[in-house]
Amino acid sequence: MILLENKYESIKEQIIVITAFILPVVNSPSIKDVKWP
């Protein structure tokens, strides 16, 4: 169960990082200028 908990903690951290990266882009008024890969 410890491995499973560590896995969820890792996923949660990744979600936090991704959210912190995406939110400013989504809230940006110049989102139409963003060049999506």
Image: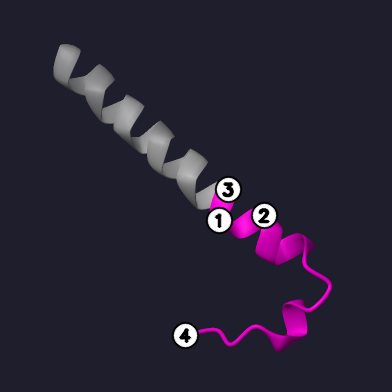
Q: Earlier in the sequence, mark 4 or mark 1?
A: 1
Assign the N terminus to one quadrant of the image. Answer: top left
Amino acid at the residue labelled 4: Pro
CB-based contact (under 8 Å), mark 1 and mark 2: yes
Give the mark toward the camera: 4 or 3: 3
Tag 3 and tag 2, C-beta contact below 8 Å: yes
Q: Name the residue under label 4.
A: 37
Kindly report the distance in space between the C-alpha atoms of the residues bearing marks 4 and 2: 17 Å
Which x, y percent locates residue 10? Answer: 31, 33
Q: Is residue 28 above or below residue 2?
A: below
Mark 2 — residue? 23
Q: Which of 9 and 4 is in front in this view?
A: 9
Alpha-carbon distance for marks 4 and 3?
19 Å
- As helix, strand or loop, the secondary structure at mark 3 comes to helix
- For label 3, the residue is 20
Q: From this viewpoint, which residue is outermost toward the right?
A: 29
Label 1 to label 2: alpha-carbon separation = 6 Å
17 displayed left or right of 35? left
Q: Name the residue under label 1.
A: 21
35 is within the stretch colored magenta: yes
